[in-house]
Amino acid sequence: MYLGAIDMGGSKTVVAVLDDKFEILATKRFEGHEKDWHIHFDRTVELLHACTAELGMTFDSLSALGVVPPGMVRNERYLLLAPATGWRNLDMLDEYSKRTGFEIIATDCDVNASAIAEADITGERDFLWYNISNGIGAAIIMNGENMPGANGVSGELGHVKVEYEHPRPCPCGQVGCCEAHASGAAIGRRVQQLAHDDPSYAELFKRKNYPVNAYGASLLARENDVKSLDVFREAGKYIGRSIAIGLNVLNPPRVFVGGGVSQSLDLLLPEIRRQIELGTVEFARNVPIERTNLGYYAALKGAAAIALRKYKKIHMND
């Protein structure tokens, strides 16, 4: 069986064909996003056609399609809001049905889909899946199923308040959110501001030929650069406050961390742990926190996972 998968991240879009074991067979990608969602959606379908052609397959060889947009999804269908793009109130199933003709299309936010893939691939049944990427979000898995909430926006730990004295504006329209202070984009902005204010810090990036962003700062932090270590300590403080809220409310037995910034989990974890000690009840805090097993393409595998689940559900009912 072959599955189409579309992962619309905040900074990139990846399109792929996978098999039902979640092996990626062909991928295409483009950076950024189109402000006009019509153009963006059309482009993803063009790339999916290119993936099937690369494999010598026809487009209708795909059994199902999974699409994960960069925002809040209700009823596994309606994109309520994608903060990074400004897209609102889109019927994802209708739009992709018109563009592809597929009968089986599944959609959910990237974090929920990734968490479902974690459950299906690893067999873990109960956990909090915390995503640190261009934005920050979380998904709640109980007995192998996602708990979406009344409007599909449970797990929005990126939008709990973690800073009150000097709150920064968040793309969601609020201030002081964890996403505004500790996402990959927020860390990058912090690094750029420090480099602007301190020429010697900027020179360090230039001399090492590192990008002036979260990734470049992580490289410097691993070389024991004090300023870069402090950037990740600060981000860990806010992430720890956010996760502590999730632990107090949900009491999960395990936390998986995904997203691009999860590659720097070792730099963040000491302060995350400190904030959990400060901010949780005793019986909720002793929880394993580890990087996802899904790797870089977690959301892409998530798109395939929700597509496969929907395919099985429909065919089991036949």
Image (spheres, grey):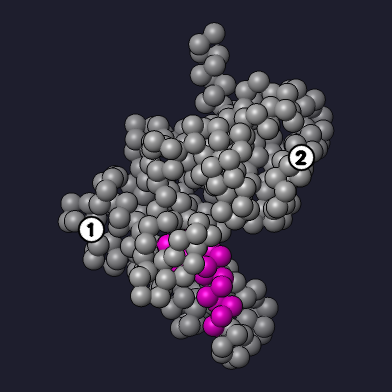
State the residue position of label 2: 42
Amino acid marked by disc 1 = Thr
Q: Is the residue 199 above or below the residue 124 in the image? A: below
Query: Residue at position x 35%, y 70% from top?
Result: 164
Q: Classify residue 275 as left or right of residue 107.
A: left
Quadrant of the frame with the N terminus: top right
The answer to whether residue 215 is seen in the rendering is yes
Asked whether disc 2 touches disc 1, contact meaning CB atoms under 8 Å apart, the reply is no
**Residue 80 place in picture, x, y as percent:** 54, 42
State the residue position of label 1: 280
Q: Which residues are magenta?
A: 177-194
Q: Is the residue 270 above or below the residue 93 in the image? A: below
**Residue found at the very far left of the displayed protein:** 282
All told, the count of numbered labels is 2
Residue at disc 2, secondary structure: helix
Q: Nearer the viewer, residue 268 or 42?
A: 42
